[in-house]
Image (cartoon, rainbow, N blue to C red):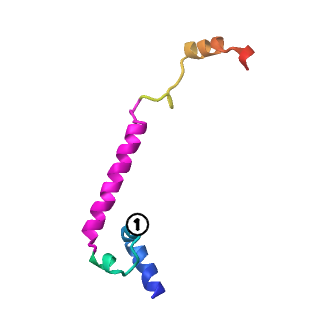
Amino acid sequence: MRDFVVEWNHRFPMDLWWRRRHKVPFGSREHRDMGFLDILFDLQEEILVIEAALAARSPYLPGSGEWGQELTEADKEKMFDDLDLDSL
């Protein structure tokens, strides 16, 4: 029986996720009545909610960051001149 449950969870991880989320025991009546499409829709909804929350918290705008941009010599000199050594 143990091997069957382990294999089931390995083959159907979204089923395990759904049972944990809804606190439904493996093989229970509620588990047997739930279809994979219902579980898939529940999972997709959860993914969309998480993605929306993350996008609202810190939207990613391609090209908006400073990573990977090379500094010109003038930029480097300005940064050096703007250093306040007294504050260090």
Q: Is residue 38 left or right of residue 60?
A: left
The x and y percentages for residue 53 are: 38, 44
Residue 26's quadrant in the figure? bottom left
Which residues are the magenta region?
Answer: 34-63
Nearer the observer, 78 or 60: 60
Nearer the observer, 46 or 23: 23
Residue located at (46% from left, 79% from top): 6
Residue 15's quadrant in the figure? bottom left
Residue at the spot of label 1: 17
The x and y percentages for residue 50 are: 38, 49
SS under mark 1 = helix
Residue located at (39% from left, 36% from top): 59
- Magenta stretch contains residue 37: yes
50 in relation to 16, above or below: above
Residue 76's quadrant in the figure? top right
Q: Mark 1 is on which residue type?
A: Trp
Q: Is residue 58 left or right of residue 78?
A: left
